[in-house]
Structures are given as structure tokens and as C-alpha cells.
Image (tube, grey):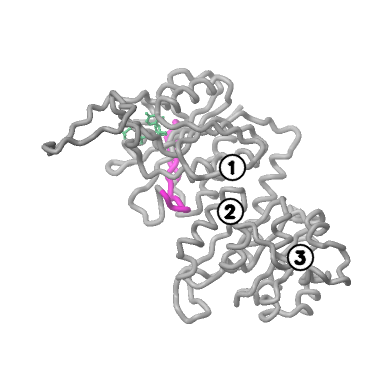
């Protein structure tokens, strides 16, 4: 079968890290897959790998200088962005990630990246301490929320002699992920394929105590947003009902409805579900809310040692949708369990009339709230159980999307 990269125009952006020595190999693999490749390299990248090597493997001019009159594309950062079908930034240093996330264009590559609007893959490579810096996390989170694909680094021996996370993903893995992306998006462009309306809930809910306080939880919404992005990229229309989160979405197929509390989420979800083919409820909904929310700030009394909040139960959104589900509609829930996980998840699946349930692991490092990775077990109504590896939330979203879309009429 021909590679989905056959005939594609791929820009490989290279920055100044030791992993730049692997960039020519990425170019070779892309060319072997039938792609036409142009490299765009920073000045620092060219200290690790030469223009001659890149020109030889890509059989193309290397774009390095904003003001080079010999460039075949005049104002190249603009015309190259039209030429490219995808851009792979490998290796991506903390510096280019910072510039890209903050809109800084001060050389040929960063300027090109700012103007590029097509699928972009960023392959971080750096020392573990840099990788773990809060600033880098914020920048990567921001890029992910705008739809940039991050091909995660792996653990191993680093150039500085230390061992840890920060090694760029191997060239074969990078090219495989780009191929997988184009395989699923070409499947979604198949004209005979139906486009579905999908309802997704994501993030936490905040239950108001008074004018300045609430009861909430640690959910960030990353899993639900990854699902929304995945479903939208496959050509479906997504209604994303989001609790309070800093995440953003740009995909034109996503209609976002922001809510605060479980009751608001309930109203939006029950209104939208009848028009949808399927719903995935990944939100961490508060089970209880204060029975009365003060519209002023509650003051403590000087002699007051304790305080009691009276809570009442919130409506169960998932169970409500399960009870009203039409023939042909599909409903997916999430479960977070600490004991008798499989057994409890199965009971939830039956009680809420679901088609399948995604069980989150709390016992695995790197899975669950706030992480970029997740490890899930999917249990369906026919009793099938599939346990996945720890992987990025984007890849978990692909697995869930595959299973759900396969099951839709
Ligand atoms: N859920 C919902 N509305 C609620 C509570 C939960 O839609 N009021 C959904 C969640 O989005 C998730 C699933 O139900 O898809 C399971 O949530 P979870 O908190 O694991 O289970 P609960 O039903 O709340 O049960 P418990 O807290 O007792 O485990």
C-alpha cells in the first residue's frame, strides 16, 4: 500500500540541538515514503548538520535566511507556507518552542512557523531539567491546545551524559506518527463516510458556595479536549461542553459551550444530545453542590470553630442521557475508580446504559488528572475488555474515536 505521504510536500524545520544529526535521516525516510521535502534550518542547527547534507538528502534548497535573494521562493516564509502540506520541527529546542508559543518570529524558521496553518508536528529534544521547566510545560500545553501535534520525547541517555526524558523520538517513530495522522485524516475525507454530530463534556465543574468560593476538582479537561480535536479532525461536528479550564480550541468543527456548574452542564448536554449521534462524557462532574449559594462573601465569626455546608446531589448527566438514548445513538462514559475497578466500571456501564466505558487508572504513574498521558481500559456492553499502554492523551483519544466511530451505524 502506498504511504499516505506519497506526493505530500513536507517542511522539516531543524533547530540547534544535538539531535539535529538525526534530521537527515528523517528527511530520507520521508523521501522514501514518496514525499517532497524542503528543510528550514536555524543558524544554530547548521552547527550540527550541514546545508550540503540536507540539500543532498532532500534534493532541495535549504531555507535558512529571511533575506537571501537566492531563495527560489521570494518572501519565502510566506510562499513556503503555501507549498507545505505539513511541517515537522525536529529537533525542537526549548527556544523555538518558546518562540512559537509566544508568537515570536526573529529568523527564517520561526517566521515561517508563525505563518504556517497546516498540520504541524513538534518533536522536543532537550535536557530533562529544561523539559520539566514550568515555562516549557506552559508553552507545550498552549501549542497542544491550538492543535499542534507534539511527538513526545523519550527517556534514555542524553548528550549531557545524564539519563532521563528528553531524547527526541526516533526518526522512524516520528515518520510513523505523521503517516498515522495522514491515514486517519484521509479516511475522514472519504466522501462516502458519514459525518457525525458528537457531544463531548470536558473539564471540572465548579459548585458555588458564595460570591468568591466554590467546590471543584483537579480535572484539567485535557482528555476531553483531545477527544474533541480528534473527532473534529476526522470531519465530525463536535459540541464541546466545557467546565472551567484554561484550554483553548481553534478547530472550525468544534462548537464550544462554556459552563460553570454541574447543573449548567446538565442543561447544555440534555439540550444537545437529541441532535447528536453520540456523546462522550469525560467531564469530572461534582456529585454534590451547596444547597444554597450566597451572593455575598460569607464572613467567619470570631468565635466560630467550624462550619457546615449542606450539600445536595447534582443530576447525573450520563445516567440521564443513558435513559433517553435513542436506537442507534451511542453513549460513552468515563470511570475513575480506586477499588474493584473493573467490577465497578461494569456496574456503571450497565446502570447508566452505556455502549462502552473508559476506565481511568489512578494507580499508574503519568495517568489521570493533569497529566499529558493516560492509561485506560475500555469495557464495552458485550463484555470485551481492552487495556492500553500508557500513552499521550492524543493517542488515547484516537483509540476511543476508532472504537466509537466503528460502532456507529
Ligand atoms: N457523570 C455525569 N454526571 C454526574 C456525575 C458523573 O455525567 N453528575 C459522568 C462522568 O462524566 C463520567 C461518569 O459519569 O463519564 C462517571 O463518573 P464518576 O465520577 O466515575 O462516577 P459517578 O457516577 O459519579 O459515581 P461515583 O462517584 O460513586 O464513583
Q: Which residue is mark 3?
A: 32
- Write the residue at 40% across / 41% down: 359
Question: Which is more N-terminal, label 2 or label 1?
Answer: 2
Q: Secondary structure at mark 2?
A: helix
Please, is residue 174 above or below residue 296 in the view? below
> Residues in magenta?
370-386
Q: Which residue is mark 2?
A: 143
Task: Report how far apart the C-alphas of labels 3 and 1 lie in the structure.
Answer: 34 Å
**Does mark 1 have its CB less than 8 Å from ligand 1?**
no
Where is residue 215 shown, x and y percent of the image? 32, 36
Please, is residue 262 above or below residue 69 in the view? above
- Write the residue at 56% across / 39% down: 228
Q: Secondary structure at mark 1?
A: loop
**Does mark 2 have its CB less than 8 Å from ligand 1?**
no
Quarter assignment of residue 16: bottom right
Question: Which is more N-terminal, label 1 or label 3?
Answer: 3
Asked whether residue 31 is drawn in magenta, I would say: no
Where is residue 12 shown, x and y percent of the image? 72, 65
Question: Which is more N-terminal, label 3 or label 2?
Answer: 3
Are the two marked residues, 3 and 1, in contact with CB atoms closer than 8 angstroms? no
Label at residue 341: none
Q: Which residue is mark 1?
A: 249
Q: Is residue 169 left or right of residue 42?
A: left
Task: Report how far apart the C-alphas of labels 2 and 3 lie in the structure.
Answer: 29 Å
Residue 265 or residue 361, whichever sits in front: 265
Where is residue 225 shown, x and y percent of the image? 53, 42
Instruction: Please rate how many residues cluster around mark 3, counting C-alpha atoms within 10 Å: few if below 14, some from 14 to 19, many from 20.
Output: few
Instruction: Please rate how many residues cluster around mark 1, counting C-alpha atoms within 10 Å: few if below 14, some from 14 to 19, many from 20.
Output: some
Amino acid at each position: 500500500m502506498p504511504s499516505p505521504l506519497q506526493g505530500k510536500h513536507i517542511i522539516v524545520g531543524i533547530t540547534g540541538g544535538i539531535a539535529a544529526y538525526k534530521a537527515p535521516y528523517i528527511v530520507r525516510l520521508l523521501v522514501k515514503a514518496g514525499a517532497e521535502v524542503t528543510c528550514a534550518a536555524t543558524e544554530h542547527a547548521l552547527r550540527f548538520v550541514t546545508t550540503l547534507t540536507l540539500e543532498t538528502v532532500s534534493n532541495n534548497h535549504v531555507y535558512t535566511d529571511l533575506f537571501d535573494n537566492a531563495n527560489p521562493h521570494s518572501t519565502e516564509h510566506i510562499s513556503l507556507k503555501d507549498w507545505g502540506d505539513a511541517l515537522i520541527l525536529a529537533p525542537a529546542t526549548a527556544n523555538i518552542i518558546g518562540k512559537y508559543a509566544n508568537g515570536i518570529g526573529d529568523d527564517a524558521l520561526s517566521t515561517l512557523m508563525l505563518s504556517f496553518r497546516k498540520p504541524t508536528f513538534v518533536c522536543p529534544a532537550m535536557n530533562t531539567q529544561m523539559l520539566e521547566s514550568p515555562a516549557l510545560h506552559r508553552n507545550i500545553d498552549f501549542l497542544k491546545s491550538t492543535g499542534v501535534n507534539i511527538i513526545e520525547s523519550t527517556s534514555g541517555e542524553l548528550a549531557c551524559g545524564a539519563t532521563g526524558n528528553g531524547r527526541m523520538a526516533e526518526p522512524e517513530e516520528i515518520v510513523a506518527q505523521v503517516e498515522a495522522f495522514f491515514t486517519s485524516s484521509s479516511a475522514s475525507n472519504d466522501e462516502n463516510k458519514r459525518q457525525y454530530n458528537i457531544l463531548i463534556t470536558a473539564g471540572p465543574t465548579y459548585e458555588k458556595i458564595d460570591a468568591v468560593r466554590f467546590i471543584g476538582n483537579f480535572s484539567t479537561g485535557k482528555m476531553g479536549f483531545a477527544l474533541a480535536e480528534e473527532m473534529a479532525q476526522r470531519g465530525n461536528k463536535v459540541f464541546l461542553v466545557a467546565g472551567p479550564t484554561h484550554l483553548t480550541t481553534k478547530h472550525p468543527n468544534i462548537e464550544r459551550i462554556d459552563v460553570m456548574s454541574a447543573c449548567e452542564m446538565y442543561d447544555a448536554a440534555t439540550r444537545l444530545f437529541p441532535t447528536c449521534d453520540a456523546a462522550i462524557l469525560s467531564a469530572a462532574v461534582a456529585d454534590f453542590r451547596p444547597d444554597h449559594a450566597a451572593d455575598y462573601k460569607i464572613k467567619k465569626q470570631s468565635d466560630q470553630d467550624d462550619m457546615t455546608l449542606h450539600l445536595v446531589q447534582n443530576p447525573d448527566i450520563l445516567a440521564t442521557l443513558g435513559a433517553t438514548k435513542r436506537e442507534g445513538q451511542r453513549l460513552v462514559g468515563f470511570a475513575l475508580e480506586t477499588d474493584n475497578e473493573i467490577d465497578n466500571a461494569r456496574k456503571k456501564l450497565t446502570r447508566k446504559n452505556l455502549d462502552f466505558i473508559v476506565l481511568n487508572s489512578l494507580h499508574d504513574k503519568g495517568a489521570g488528572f493533569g497529566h499529558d498521558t493516560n492509561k485506560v481500559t475500555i469495557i464495552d456492553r458485550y463484555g470485551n475488555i481492552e487495556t492500553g499502554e500508557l500513552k499521550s492523551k492524543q493517542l488515547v483519544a484516537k483509540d476511543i474515536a476508532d472504537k466509537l466511530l466503528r460502532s456507529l451505524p
